[in-house]
Amino acid sequence: QVQLVESGGGLVQAGGSLRLSCAASGIPFSRSAVAWYRQAPNKDRLLVATLNTSGGPRYADSVRGRFSIYRDNAKHTVDLQMNSLKPEDTAVYYCGFARGGVWDLRGAYWGKGTLVIVSS
């Protein structure tokens, strides 16, 4: 049974940092591309970062240079380090796992999300 559990969200002041983590089980972790998405209130879910099983990470323009995605194949975790946070980063953040080594939304598995609030 696939289980993805995000943690690390919370309230932070603008300019601060948070590190989100996603623990995965029931998935062939090392063969799965991973991603972080976020959904602000009344907005669509948008891509934040992806990391395939080979190659480097990709980031949304809005977070490039501030956020970093990491995966630990031994611990089965995917982290999102978020620095220089802005109020517009406020959202529920979701981790996703693809069914293959290249990120693809179709058929992806999702966690329930963790809320990040950035105060001004």
Image (cartoon, rainbow, N blue to C red):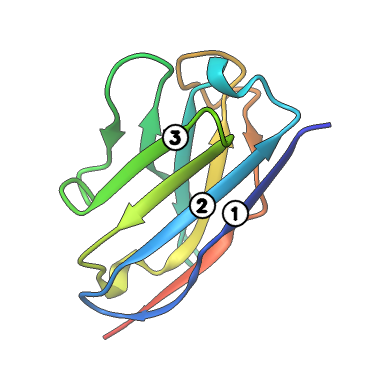
Residue 6 has which mark? 1
Label 2, label 3: how far apart the Cα atoms are: 9 Å
Quick one: label 1 or label 3, which is nearer the N terminus?
1
Q: Position of residue 1 (x, y in %)?
A: 84, 31
User: Which of the 4 image quarters holds residue 82?
Assistant: bottom left
Q: Amino acid at mark 2?
A: Ser
Q: Amino acid at mark 1?
A: Glu
Q: Residues within 10 Å of mark 3 (few under 14, many from 20)?
A: many
Quick one: label 1 or label 2, which is nearer the N terminus?
1
Q: Residues within 10 Å of mark 1 (few under 14, many from 20)?
A: many
Q: Residue furthest left?
A: 65
User: Which of the 4 image quarters holds residue 96?
Assistant: top right
Is 42 located above or below residue 38 in the figure? Answer: below
Q: Residue at x 34, y 53 (%)?
A: 81
Q: Residue at x 20, y 44 (%)?
A: 61
The one nearer the camera, 89 or 26, is: 26
Q: Position of residue 71 (x, y in %)?
A: 44, 34
Label 1, label 2: how far apart the Cα atoms are: 6 Å
Q: In terms of secondary structure, where does tag 3 sit?
A: strand
Residue 71 has which mark? 3
Left or right: residue 16 versus residue 18 is left
Q: Residue furthest front?
A: 74
Q: Which residue is mark 2?
A: 21
Q: Are marks 1 and 2 in contact (CB under 8 Å)?
A: yes
Is 92 located above or below residue 107 in the figure? Answer: below
Quick one: label 2 or label 3, which is nearer the N terminus?
2
Label 1, label 3: how far apart the Cα atoms are: 13 Å
Residue 91 has which mark? none
Q: In terms of secondary structure, where does tag 1 sit?
A: strand
